[in-house]
Image (cartoon, rainbow, N blue to C red):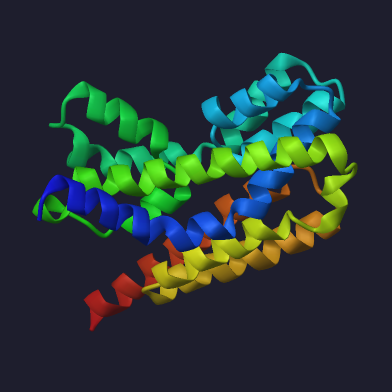
Amino acid sequence: MKNRAYFIKGLLAVLPLSIAVIPWGILAGSYALQVGMTKIEAQAMSALVFAGSAQLVATGMIQAGAGLGSILATVFFISARHFLYSISFRERVSKLPFRWRFGLGFLLTDELFALCNHQHGKAFKRSYALGVGLGFYVVWNIASFIGIILGSTLPNMDEYGLEFAVAATFIAIVVPMILSLSQLVCVLIAASLSTLLTALKVDGALIIASFTAMLCAYIFESLGKRRETKQ
C-alpha cells in the first residue's frame, strides 16, 4: 500500500473522533473571545497549543488574572501525559528524519496515541500516523474557527453543555484500550476518585486521582504476578 493510501486510511480512522470533538473545539474558540482575546489570538491558540483541556484551563486562568508562571505550570501538568506518549513512540520514530519526528511530535494527541499505539515495528506506518494527526488537527482548528465566529454573535456559549464532548471523546478512546484487569482497576479508580474529589472541591483532583489510580493498578498487577510465580 502506498503512502497516500495509508494517509487516507489514517484520515478515515480518526474521523469519528474528530466529529466527536467538534463541540469541544467550538467551546474553546468561543471561550477565548469571552476572556478578551482577539479572533487572531484565539485561532492562534488552537493552531499552536493544540490541546483542548489545556487551552480551556489556560483561558480560564487568563480570565482570572493568573500569572504566567502559574499558567505554564498548570498546563505542563495537564499535558504531562503527552510526555509518556512520546516515550512510548520513541522507538518507532527515532530513525525517521527530523521533519517527521517534529511533525508527529507536534500532532501527538490522545487520539493519535489511541489509534497508533498498537502498531509496532513494520506495522507502524508514518503516513497513517500523519493522516490521523493532521486530520484531527484540521478539524480541531475548523471547529475553533466556528466557535470564534459563533462567539462573536452568540454570548455565553459555555452554557450550552458543549464541554461534554471531551468526556464522550475520552470514553470512546479509553474503553477499547482496557485489555486487562489491572487496566480496568486503574480506569474505575481514576473515574470514581476524580468525581469524588471534584465534588469535594479538592485542588488538583484530577492529578491526585490519576496518580492514585496508576499506583493501585501497579500494586494490583504486581500482586497478580507474585501469585502466578508462587503457583
Q: Is residue 211 left or right of residue 103?
A: right
* Image-quadrant location for residue 219: bottom left
Residue 110 position, x and y percent, is 46, 50
* Image-quadrant location for residue 21: bottom right
Residue 109 position, x and y percent, is 45, 44
Give whichever of 99, 120 is nearer the camera: 99
Residue plotted at (10% across, 56% down): 1
Residue 117 visible: no
Residue plotted at (74% across, 37% down): 149
Q: Quadrant of the C terminus?
A: bottom left
Q: Is residue 201 left or right of residue 40?
A: right
- Answer above or below: position of 67 versus 227: above
Q: Is residue 190 left or right of residue 81?
A: right
Q: Is residue 225 left or right of residue 61?
A: left
- Answer above or below: position of 20 versus 129: below
Residue 213 visible: yes
